[in-house]
Amino acid sequence: MSVLQLRDVTKVHGAGDAQVHALRGVSLTVGTGELVAVMGPSGSGKSTLLNIAGGLDTATTGTVEVEGMHVAQLSVAGRAKLRRTFVGYVFQSYNLIPALTAVENVALPLELSGVSVKHARREALAALEAVGVDHLAKRFPDDMSGGQQQRVAIARAIVGERRVILADEPAGALDTLGGDEVLELLRARCDAGASALLVTHEARHAGWADRVVFLRDGQIVDETKAAAGILAAEAGR
């Protein structure tokens, strides 16, 4: 069963001679329990793909469905609710709220969805523990390292019953061991029934995926299911 489906999605910025085609007819399905990695050079459309998949941006043409819901047909409030309840997003820039502690940042999506503060904080602490930073629960983002902020951002993406996790270079601010721990966590979430779309430039990280798609100039140019073939495929681009 597909949880996330993009059909013939294009994204065009600007007009006339200034037009930039960020995505060109991209079709992609992510099934239940599947971890799909997206690789490609800078400017190939990877982050745009994630933004459209999560309802942070809209496609110029084509359709996007999350859990059977057509994202383009949802109101702004509806897309916000979708992200709070079904979709967890890990941004490259963390996007933590400076005035909130780690546990408050992680609990916020649940509280905005009507979950009681007590229950939301309990869920948030469990998510922080899962990524190994529960000891930072009362600390503010400015008092954390980049790697610590990244772990808190990942905890926010997995808290509650998120069915889809969209991760943009989630291990980018972490060392090798920390990066492996994060990818192991994403793998475990998918094995438990969630689905994830992972943008990465590291073939080693893509090796955790069930399937790897390669983007170039806004188009999917190849895909592989064989983790052993990732390095060879990427080396040929």
Image: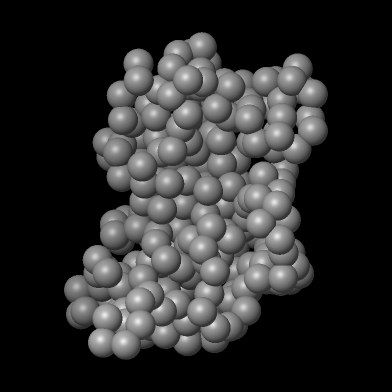
- Give x and y (percent) for residue 218: 36, 79
- Give x and y (percent) for residue 198: 45, 58
Of 150 and 8, which appears nearest the observer? 8
Q: How many discs mark residues in the rendered view?
A: 0
Of 133 and 7, which appears nearest the observer? 7
Judged left or right of residue 7, residue 2 is: right
One can see residue 71 in this view: yes
One can see residue 171 in this view: no
The colour scheme is one colour
Judged left or right of residue 145, residue 209 is: right
- x 58%, y 22%: residue: 104
Q: Quadrant of the N terminus?
A: bottom right
Q: Quadrant of the C terminus?
A: bottom left
- x 29%, y 57%: residue: 202
- x 36%, y 42%: residue: 93
- x 35%, y 20%: residue: 142
- Give x and y (percent) for residue 156: 56, 35
Q: Is residue 169 above or below residue 225?
A: above
Of 140 and 36, which appears nearest the observer? 140
- Give x and y (percent) for residue 57: 51, 63
